[in-house]
Image (cartoon, grey):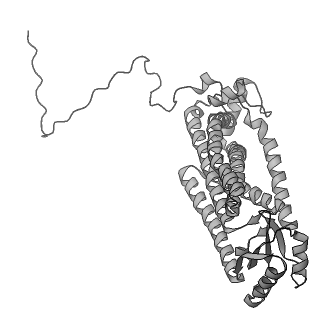
Amino acid sequence: MGLLRDVFNGETALDYPRWWRRAVTVSLVAIVLSVGSFGVRGLNLGIDFEGGTTFEVLAPGVSVAEAREVMAGIGSEDSRIQTVDGDVIRIRSEVSDPAHAAEIRNLLDTQLGTVQTFEQVGPTWGAEVTSKAANALVVFFAVVALYITVRLEWKMALGALAAVAHDIVVSVGLYSILQLEITPSTVIAFLTIMGYSLYDTIVVYDKVREVTGRLGATERYTYTELMNLALNRVTMRSINTSITSAIPVVSLLLIGSVIMGATTLQEFGIALLIGIIVGSYSSLFIASTLVTVLKEREERWIQVADKVAQRTGVSDDGATRLIGREEAALPDTRSTERPGAAKGPARRRPVATTHLAGGVPPRPRKKRR
């Protein structure tokens, strides 16, 4: 309870640098599994990407094995068959010939049940959709990199892009491992994931810039310690944002998909839910880790680390000093106060006035005796 209270109040309580190495290890394992699944299992692309024909047949009491036997009888034993909403069987075939597709439809009406939905997409359309999705991804990365570089710096842009790429690879990898179908709605959800992850990362970076601007000039703390302080300040905000974003998505899945049976909402909602969880994780662990590693190699922060080590007598052995609440509340060191000036209440400087009409200024008044 004490730890939760400190996190909620924004006080420094968590030692993020201790978890970075473990987090990076977990992320590397997840990326390796995802990439391995891409090569072994592949992606279950929807009909809009690959083309083909989809049938949804109302067939009470018919199993997937029986439906596969029917499709094998017409030479389509490689069709993807799954049960949808209990009595509905979805059959996905690569048949693109309209005449052949019509024959299959008549056969399913005769031997399985009633064909409720029939959809056919040509391979040209699928290739066009795939190309547009890839172009949208490239444009997104380019615009994001340019914006963060101008708004912050290129090191933070690199960290943000690494976090977004991590989120996409892990999310799509989970779809590959579970063989969930990827549709245009799923692609929209993935783009939304990137936007959410980027927003969360920029919130962290903005707090980092505020902390380093206020405490960095004192040269009393390393960049890692300042990053740790900034992460503790935004942890609760990130958690609250994730929870409030996940609540409507969970409601969408439970009400729209489970209760009402809208499978399109399920495809969209699962991708969003995975992205919210992974995006919050990457902004606190992946993006911050990469930026810290890059910043600690700058000449300025190397000198600061040496001064801190000489002053504290603690070498850089991986331990991070936690900045207390009183230390974090130091005033802004970027003030314009001159060294050696007398301390005390600030006195207003006299305002210089200029004679607007030009020429000689007016004579001063004589003092009365």
Q: Position of residue 217 (x, y in %)?
A: 57, 33
**What's the residue at 70%, 51% (across, down)?**
254
**What's the residue at 75%, 88% (across, down)?**
97
Q: Where is residue 140 in the image (x, y as percent from the top left)?
A: 61, 62
Residue, far bottom: 99
Looking at the image, is 147 positioned above or below residue 236? below
Side of 298 where 25 appears, left or right: right
Q: Where is residue 330 in the image (x, y as percent from the top left)?
A: 56, 25
Q: Where is residue 90 in the image (x, y as percent from the top left)?
A: 78, 71
Side of 108 where 161 appears, left or right: left
**What's the residue at 88%, 66% (across, down)?**
40
Query: What is the number of callouts on the image?
Result: 0
Asked whether 259 or 361 is in front, the reply is 259
Quadrant showing the N terminus: top right
- Can residue 338 be seen here? The reply is yes
Side of 327 where 368 appears, left or right: left
Residue, far top: 369
- Can residue 290 be seen here? The reply is no
Quadrant showing the C terminus: top left
**What's the residue at 52%, 26% (across, down)?**
331
